[in-house]
Amino acid sequence: MAGRILLVEDNEDDVALTLRALEKNRLHNDVEIVRDGQDALDLLFRRGEYASRSPADLPELILLDLKVPRVDGLEVLRQIRASPVTQFLPVVVLTSSSQERDVVQSYQLGANSYVQKPVDFDDFIEATRQLGMYWLVLNKLPPG
């Protein structure tokens, strides 16, 4: 079974665009969507409504927008990398921000990749195809 993707995105249009791009690229992974950073952390660390989840039920890839409510994407990334449970999960920052400080901070905090969302749909489909092929097919994670 293909690995699950966690999409941390609050913009409905960007959620729909990402799901459509995954579908067009025949990446039939299950996609779990959370709308803010606090829900992402609760899901990953099995808190609140996610407390009953299995410890093994982690996504294979996290697509993380930086500009999400409650807890921003940079803090989500910081906490992911600080925990031995989640430190090796691939995190691709997928955001509309082109600010240099966001790029630098994302990599300083351990992002595996930083992708600025293309405005053109065809470009977005191609970017999604490449992300899916690399992170979900070619990339090998450490055991655990």
Image (cartoon, helix red, strand yellow):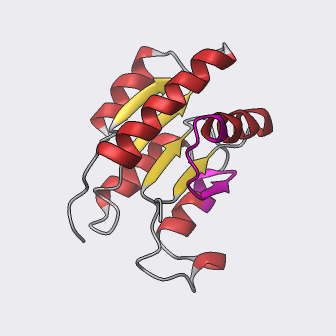
Q: Can residue 118 be seen?
A: no
Question: Is 32 within the magenta?
Answer: yes
Q: Can residue 131 be seen?
A: yes
Q: Residue at x 41, y 20 (%)?
A: 101
Q: Position of residue 111 (x, y in %)?
A: 35, 39
Q: Residue furthest front?
A: 26
Q: Residue furthest right?
A: 12
Q: Residue at x 42, y 80 (%)?
A: 55
Q: Residue at x 58, y 16 (%)?
A: 123
Segment colored magenta: 23-39
Q: Position of residue 18 (x, y in %)?
A: 65, 37
Where, by quadrant of the figure, is residue 110 drawn? top left
Is residue 108 rendered to the left or right of residue 59? left
Q: What is the quadrant of the C terminus in the image?
A: bottom left
Between 76 and 96, the one nearer to me in the picture = 96
Q: Position of residue 135 (x, y in %)?
A: 37, 43
Task: Name above or below for residue 87 compared with residue 11.
Answer: below
